[in-house]
Image (cartoon, helix red, strand yellow):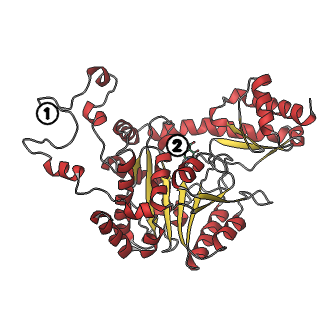
Amino acid sequence: MLDPLAAELNEAIGAANPHVFDMLSTKGKEIFFPSKGILAQTAEAKGKAINATIGVALEDCGAAMILPSLDALVKMKGYDVFAYAPNLGNPEIREAWKRLLLKKNPSLNKDGNCISTPVVTASLTHGLSAAGYLFIEEGDKIITPDLFWENYSLVFNYAYGSKFDTFPMFNGKGGFNTEALREKLISGPVGKRIVILNFPNNPTGYTVSAAEAETTRDIIIEAAEKGNNIVVLIDDAYFGLVFENDVIEESMFTYLVDAHERVLAVKVDGPTKEDYVWGLRIGFVTFACARGGSSLNQTMEAKLGGSIRSSVSSASRIGQAMLLRAYEADEYEAEKSEKFEILERRYKKIKEILEHRKEYAEYLHPLPFNSGYFMCLEVKCGKAEEVRRVLLDKYDTGVIALGNLLRVAFSSTPYGHLEKLFDNIYMAVSEVAGGG
Ligand SMILES: Cc1ncc(COP(=O)(O)O)c(C=O)c1O
């Protein structure tokens, strides 16, 4: 039986944009934010002389119970870090992240654009999963380039029963394979399509050029014009880390926010990689569609809130509190630039190494890269796992083997070790390929 609150949300979504209603999975249609349950009743009791609603513990004086040994560890007020955060996230951090989004993606400020207020999730992984809950039906196909973050398969396929429908990420000219994406989107019966786009990409470190981003948008619009309802999940985990001028600096989201009434853009992002806070476990999900406006956005936020409530209930409050302080700090931008420059310097060094060490080409082929934390080397003999083993056993060096690729995380390799790292890879691959 559909809960009346779910029915209410479904009706509002259907009225705002029936195509988006059709994009929802069965679970997505059934889920709702329990706006009349414990959370709502607690909100109504706020400020009452006697308030025995929510399950937090308060001292007899009314202050939050906090263990002094924990309180002593943080400079912020205990309540701000140890209390529950609202289910959709602290309103201040949601607004702060939105302001940052608009600043980092100036094209979003265009008249008529309507993006939702970012909802806080417990990391990007959780944001992807919470979005998957809303849209993925058992057996659905997810269109993605063949080089993607390994965990997508657990997050989407194992958890929700989808299957990947991959296309080769690069065309023969070293660019994003928009033609193959087109083929996937256009072919087959008209219906729902789910696409995932991740730039800067994990594992390749590739970001599309403006021309490729425009073509991607045009292809998605073309597929929508044919009657397909398209959910585009935009995983911006490595947003902002672009090291070349000829690639997009704004998110792919900016190209899709007002693309078509049958295209729902779902931006999943957060501070994990951008702000170097991997363990804080905070992420954000933001929606946009050409039709439905703020009414659609608010109902989609409530749907996502239901999915969050059903999994982690709410994200870490200390994480949100710390980030809010950082985003308000005068030094934030400068500190972030400093870290960017460290990564950019390593990126440039790798380009220089590959440029000079022509002999590498016998065994290794670097895939296009211009951004992010990683780059990939294709192992021409195909024995990437063997090369990885040799690197571990003989060269004291660790990289990741993925099929016939070696993924190199320059994000975690000191500048001074880069030459040695690539030399080690070259020696190991020479041994494996040459039978040494
Ligand atoms: C492409 C991509 N998306 C999402 C994530 C997960 O981010 P989080 O640690 O915030 O869950 C990663 C982490 O490696 C990633 O590479």
Q: Residue furthest front?
A: 1
- Residue 250's quadrant in the figure? bottom right
Could you say whether the residue bearing mark 2 is in a helix, strand or loop? helix
Q: Amino acid at mark 1?
A: Gly
Q: Which circle's residue, 1 or 2, is located before the other in the chain?
A: 1
According to the picture, the residue beneath numbered tag 2 turns out to be 274
Determine the CA span between mark 1 and mark 2: 38 Å
- Name the residue nearer the viewer: 404 or 357: 404
According to the picture, the residue beneath numbered tag 1 turns out to be 62
- Name the residue nearer the viewer: 373 or 313: 313
Image quarter (top left, top right, bottom left or bottom right) of the N terminus:
bottom left
Question: What's the residue at 22%, 49% (across, down)?
Answer: 38
Q: Position of residue 343 (x, y in %)?
A: 62, 37
- Looking at the image, residue 249 sits to the left or right of residue 421; the answer is left
Crowd class of label 1 (few under 14; some 14 to 19; many from 20; radius 10 Å): few
- Residue 5's quadrant in the figure? bottom left
Q: Taking the image as drawn, is residue 419 in sight?
A: no
- Above or below residue 339? Residue 178 is below
Could you say whether the residue bearing mark 1 is in a helix, strand or loop? loop
Q: Position of residue 421 (x, y in %)?
A: 75, 30
- Above or below residue 269? Residue 435 is above
Q: Nearer the viewer, mark 1 or mark 2?
A: 1
- Above or below residue 376? Residue 228 is below
Q: Taking the image as drawn, is residue 51 in sight?
A: yes
Crowd class of label 2 (few under 14; some 14 to 19; many from 20; radius 10 Å): some
Q: Residue furthest left?
A: 49
Question: What's the residue at 69%, 40% (across, down)?
Answer: 347
Question: What's the residue at 11%, 30% (across, down)?
Answer: 61
